[in-house]
Image (cartoon, helix red, strand yellow):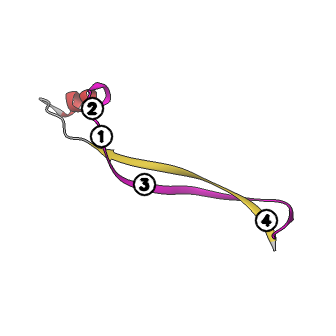
Amino acid sequence: MKRYIVKFEEIRHYEMVVDAWDEESAIRHARTGPENPVWVNVDLQNFRAEAITGEAA
C-alpha cells in the first residue's frame, strides 16, 4: 500500500437577496453591499493524488 497526498478545491456557494433595478446593479450591489451572504452549499472538486515516498501505516 502506498501513501498519497490528495489535493482538491473547495468551492463555496452563497446567495443573498438584494434590491436593485436590474441584474447588473444587483450584482454590483452584492459585491459591494453591507449585506451578509448566506452559505448554501460546498462542493469539493478537482481531486488530484500524488504518490509520496514511504509506506502507509
User: Which residue is denoted by mark 4 in the rendering?
Assistant: 3
User: Which residue is denoted by mark 1 in the rendering?
Assistant: 37
Name the N-terminal-most of marks 2 and 4. 4
Circle 3 SS class: strand
- State the CA–CA distance, disc 3 to disc 1: 14 Å
Q: Amino acid at mark 4?
A: Arg
The stretch of residues the image draws in magenta is 30-57
Is-magenta flag for residue 14?
A: no
- Are circles 1 and 2 on residues that touch, CB within 8 Å? yes
Q: Crowding at label 3, few (<14), some or many (≥20) Cα neighbours within 10 Å?
A: few
Q: Quadrant of the N terminus?
A: bottom right
Relative depth, front residue between 41 and 22: 41
Circle 2 SS class: helix
Find residue 37 and report its horizontal and vertical position in percent.
30, 40
Displayed quadrant of residue 17: top left
Find residue 35 and report its horizontal and vertical position in percent.
25, 32
Say whether residue 4 is left or right of residue 13.
Answer: right
Residue under the image location 23 percent in, 29 percent down: 24
Find residue 14 and report its horizontal and vertical position in percent.
33, 45
The numbered disc on residue 42 is 3
